[in-house]
Image: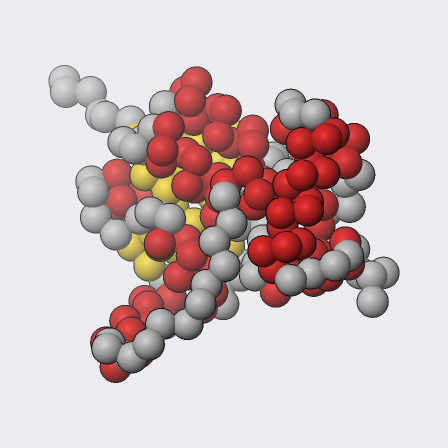
Amino acid sequence: MKSVKHITVLLAEDHQIVREGLRKILEAESDIEVVGDASTGRQAVLLVKKLRPAVVVMDIAMPLLNGIEATRQILNAAPETKILILSAHSDDAYIEKATAMGASGFLIKQTSAHVLSDAIREIEKGNTFFSPSVAKRLQRHHQTARDRKGQPKTTEVHLTPREMEVLQLIAEGEANKQVAAELGISIKTVEKHRDHLMQKLGIHDTAGLTRYAIGEGIVESSVQLTIV
């Protein structure tokens, strides 16, 4: 009897109850095997390097390293791994950034269990899979891009991957010492990154950096609500 090929999956989701629910849903499928789970974006990157899963089911709002940047790092380290975004956030900015980083699919969390399993199977084959509402937004974005072809481009601030990591940790309320420990760099280096961020973005305080990170979808809007 021919054995069924298992699609290996890593779950990257910061809420334990959601991770456990996703694991139960996927373990009910005979051809899908959950090989690990991660509660932070950084942990997801490390586990992908170790486990080399076929598919990562990735939330966007991940602590320490958001799902967008984690996707970029994972695909740099393991280009054969496919990324399926599963998120409550379906704003155009999130969708565009996720697909730009190389995600093969994007589902909203209201998706039914069988659709999640079908999406995993499709992207493992090398196809793409999007929730209908997400597909419509992508289509609209591409149409807008075609309509704007030939128009002058707006100036876009480019942040390095390390600056993105530092920015997220700062926006999550981490002090320089904590950022240094998390990234394995010196406090002086963290201060340099912070200075470069402020110079590039024209921002002069931590509250401004936090508001920028929230506006760009790097962290959730619930982060540091006391900042005004």
Where does the C terminus fall, quadrant-wise?
Answer: bottom right
Quadrant in the rendering for residue 140: bottom left
Q: Residue at x 33, y 59 (%)?
A: 130
Query: Is the image coloured rainbow, by chain, by secondary structure, or in one colour?
Result: secondary structure
Horizontal and vertical percent for residue 198? 67, 54
Quadrant in the rendering for residue 71: top left
Horizontal and vertical percent for residue 127? 21, 48
Q: Residue at x 26, y 39 (%)?
A: 124
Q: Is residue 49 above or below residue 119?
A: above
In depth, the one of 199 and 215 nearer the eye is 199
Q: Residue at x 72, y 30 (%)?
A: 188
Q: With 203 as the anchor, is 11 left or right in this view?
A: left
Number of dots carrying numbers = 0
* Residue 39 visible in this rendered orientation of the protein: yes
Horizontal and vertical percent for residue 227? 82, 61
Of all residues, the one furthest to the left in this rendering is 1
Q: Is residue 37 above or below residue 114?
A: above
Q: Residue at x 61, y 65 (%)?
A: 215
Quadrant in the rendering for residue 212: bottom right
Q: Is residue 24 above or below residue 113?
A: above
Where does the N terminus fall, quadrant-wise?
Answer: top left
Q: With 92 as the anchor, is 218 left or right in this view?
A: right
